[in-house]
Amino acid sequence: MESGRDSYLHLFRYYHTLKNMKFGQIINYILFKRRRKKLSIIDARGIIALTESLKQNYKFEDNQKNFDICFYNQPISFNTDELNWEPRNISTETEEMWLIKLHSFDWLNDENSTNISDKLASFLILDWLSKYSDEHSKVWEPYTLSKRLVSWTKWLSSNKTAPELPSIIKLSVSQQLKRLFIDLEYFNPGNELIENIRGFLAGCCLLINSSQYFNNELEYQLEQIIDEAIEQLNIQILKDGAHFERSPYYHFKMLEAMKDIKNLAVNISKQGFLLPDLLEKADNLATLCQDKIESMMKWHKIESMMKWLEKLTFSNGEVSQFNDSARIKGLNRSFEELTELLEDSGFFVKHNSDYSFILSCGSPSPAFLPSHSHCDILSYELEINKQLAVIDSGCSGYDNETLRQMSRETEAHNLPMVQHQDQSDIWGRFNFGKRAKIINRVFNKEDSSLEIEIKDQFGQILIRRISFSNKSIEISDLLKKRRMEGCFVSLLHLAPNIELEIKQGECENIINCKMTNDLKFSIITKANVRVSDYISFPDFGKSVGAKMLSLSNKEAEELTYVIKW
């Protein structure tokens, strides 16, 4: 039975979670749940009858019946005779993500996921249509539905199919658009809503020359979606070029979405039979997307999405792994040297020929939707001589709540903390209660030093000072104000496959670190050093063991160490 104190703590948590949300989010969430459960607008019986009949025309030889689909590092085998769209042998770390991707069909256009013939792809689409007509089912939820509209539209434009298949897909797309329009994720106004917009535009472009489906109602809805797209892009893309969820991974995904939205808007703007106002808005959307993607509007102090992603990318082209992120290939950097404090998104970056240093110094973002944020203020990643040395532990996925919680906690990052006290209150899979705040951050170019001061959820004040030299970085952590019991520690998560040798001396400890290419660096400190194992997640569903250093000094509330190479 829950005690009175526990009830109070839960109310306190909900208060700090809800107070940062927009009122419209809460109302739209309640309405969304009601519509998903109660409102029916689709009659798919005609599609089911057609698809069941057409499936009989597809015969596969024994050597063609078995195929594999692989994403999130999880391959699954399928057979055309007993096609199971809800396989159960998926890892618990990625089960929901895996099924969403399966039913979104974007693997049809990804040679890295699978290599499926046009014939097999056509059969799979027909099979799906014959089995998933329930608009209230999970696979008809707006995010999955939106991705599916984009996937089918792209696949139809680049593959040869039986002449009857496009007409059936268009019929289904017209129904899915009806459902998507009433289910738009206004309660989740981040990357999910951008995906909804991209999906709706893609579906409209597929139907735009079919008078049977593209009517006055859909034209009116299309104009509303374009208005929403313009508003959201101005909100979600910050002045320094970052997507406001502060995840390099989702930033890359949003960059891809923006390119699609631009091309779809250009296509719509060329349809002379549409209303003049709609054509003008489509043209404005295409121009806005182009400006956000790669224009350099320096006179407005606005940076592009591509340039921001370059800044958060290491020399091998892989993105840094802050917040919910996988270490995917981003963009090849167009510069070798750069030092900049990105005020809007809250990152500090320093790149030169010897090393790359990227530090998170922004609050959970955006305040009304910190779903993909971690307790990582003051955490950094470090690349030395083009090889990762200190890394973020990454994101396991969203389904395993234990691993999800572990990867978001303060202890999963490279920062100072009072042991076992998270800087922000994270709960559930995506929620933030009371959260840490930035008090001050400043970079002094003259002596090449960075100082950041934060206040955690308990009111404790921590300061991190960093000094950069030619072949070393000195980091000093100070617990300026203590409110909770526990040992003050500073954590470093080393990259996998680094070999350690610890030399303890009377005045200082030296941790020699040997990387896989025989390059070496050392961590020098007067603090006590404890080595432990941790799990890093370089990609969703993929885990790798590595070593973590925990520095402490019971006699002082300041810890200093130097990384030298």
Image: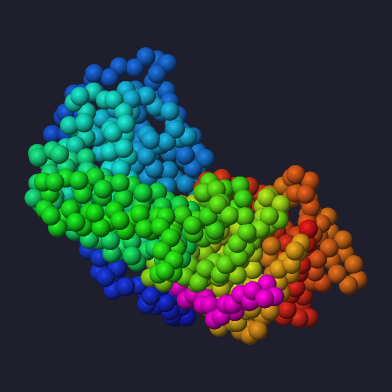
Judging depth in this view, the residue of 552 and 351 nearest the camera is 351
The residue lying furthest to the right in this view is: 506
Q: Is residue 101 above or below residue 55?
A: below
> Residue 451: image x %, image y %?
63, 76
Q: Is residue 254 above or below residue 555?
A: above
Q: Quadrant of residue 528?
A: bottom right
Tell me where residue 455 sits by quadrant: bottom right
Q: Dividing the picture into quarters, in which one does residue 126 lie?
A: top left
- In this rendering, would 98 be left or right of 474? left
- Tag count in the figure? 0
Q: Is residue 112 above or below residue 4?
A: above
Whether 432 is among the magenta residues is yes
Q: Is any atom of residue 486 visible in this view?
A: no
Nearer to us in this view, 284 or 146: 284
Q: How is the image coloured?
A: rainbow
Which residues lie in the magenta part?
425-453
Horizontal and vertical percent position of residue 138: 30, 48
Work out whether residue 532 can be spotted.
Answer: yes
Q: Work out which residue is located at the far top of the displayed protein and give it.
A: 61
Of the pair 460 and 11, the residue shown nearer to us: 460
Quadrant in which the N terminus is drawn = bottom left
Q: Is residue 487 left or right of residue 331?
A: right
State the residue at coordinates (84%, 66%). Answer: 509
Quarter of the rendering occupied by the C terminus = bottom right
* Residue 58 shown left or right of residue 545 in the figure: left
Q: Is residue 252 magenta?
A: no
Question: Where residue 489 appears, x then y in whole percent?
Answer: 70, 72
Q: Nearer the viewer, residue 529 or 415?
A: 415
- Residue drawn at x 91%, y 71% is 506
- Residue at image x 60%, y 65%? 339
